[in-house]
Amino acid sequence: MIYSYAPMEGITTWWYRQVFSRHFDKIDRYYTFFLTPRYGNVMGRDVRELINENNQGLNVIPQVMTNKSDLFVDFVRDIKAKGYEEVNLNLGCPMQTVVGKQRASWFLAHPEELERFLDEIFSSSQLPISIKTRVGFDSLELLPRLVDIFNNYPIKELIVHPRLRSDFYKNSVNMEAFDFVYKSSKVPVGYNGDLFTPESVNDFRTRYPEVEHIMLGRGLICNPALARLCEGGSQLTIEEFFSFHSDMQRTMMNIMPGGDIYLDRMKEFWWYWCRLFEDGERLVKSIRKARKTIDYNCAVEKLFNNTAIKQRPYFL
Ligand SMILES: Cc1cc2nc3c(=O)[nH]c(=O)nc-3n(C[C@H](O)[C@H](O)[C@H](O)COP(=O)(O)O)c2cc1C
């Protein structure tokens, strides 16, 4: 089984990949969060994501989100020159700011434009293209049409998150819709969505033995040992977690100079991590309140000394 770390804006940055991979194994691929090429000026944060020295030793697949085929093709030429071997097209992002600009999941409601865009990028791309998609915009009505369109292109892999754009991350994943894609796609299909426990991954694998790639997102942020557990490895220990946490803190302090600014980013991770601990919601309150590193460290130490990892430490 191939496990990958899902692209997640604000989470799966180059430095997070580095820290994560120093502590946890079994992740075969990392996708960057969506990069957005522009005319003229390249965003500094996008450049840093792709620099080779920031991704050494890791299998990283850049994800791109655009509706301009010339920008896509130029982006691919640039990443090919850096040694990347695949590009991933984002057709899933549900955010209004993105959809309003006719990007990502917007295409799922506009099959003619999707076809035109795919024609243009597949005729000029210098690298294989994989696609991460949802199963529709606000209904499943167009799904057969979308699969027909995908079937006409040499797509390396179709990674399916079986929610509609209108679901955002609410409601449950629609496994009937996934089933439909799985059965009618000529393109190899990967799966992403709501696999938070080793049991749910096992159930999925039993039901879909031919799916070779599982992409993990929120479940892996919460429990960084999730892929290892899915492969029969050991449960996350509190020492292991705090060693990972200290490495993250050190790394963030180095790359986000400016005193305690990094703490806001750190707290975003605690929204996931609090689920790892018995009574985590309550104990994490003082971590959230900390404005200075000294208070933050005290709150973290208190948590470390006063709790244990849950029996089922998952994003549930
Ligand atoms: C905070 C956040 C940021 C995300 N950023 C991206 C992104 O940059 N590109 C993308 O394709 N999907 C993005 N996603 C969607 C995830 O890649 C994934 O499809 C989603 O979390 C469902 O998988 P999961 O149930 O394993 O978490 C994001 C999701 C979240 C919650």
Image (spheres, grey):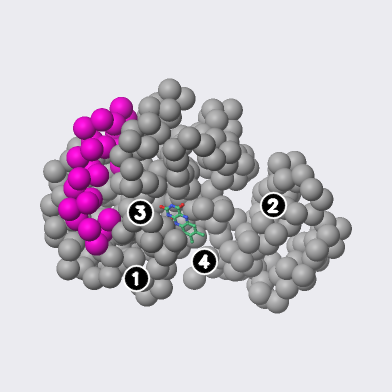
Per the rendered image, the range of residues in magenta is 107-130
Please indicate whether residue 222 sits to the left or right of residue 217 in the image: right
Q: From this viewpoint, is residue 31 visible?
A: no
Question: Of discs 1 and 4, which sits in the foreground?
Answer: 1
Marks 2 and 4, the one that precedes in the sequence: 2
Marks 1 and 3, the one that precedes in the sequence: 3
- Residue named by callout 1: 166
Please give the label number shown on residue 245.
2
Q: Which amino acid does label 4 sit on?
A: Phe
Marks 1 and 4, the one that precedes in the sequence: 1
Question: Of discs 1 and 3, which sits in the foreground?
Answer: 3
Q: Is mark 1 on a helix, strand or loop?
A: helix
Question: Of discs 3 and 4, which sits in the foreground?
Answer: 3
Q: In which quarter of the image is residue 182?
A: bottom left
Percent position of residue 223, x then y? 55, 58
Marks 3 and 2, the one that precedes in the sequence: 3
Q: Is residue 119 magenta?
A: yes
Above or below, comparing residue 155 to residue 305 in the picture: above
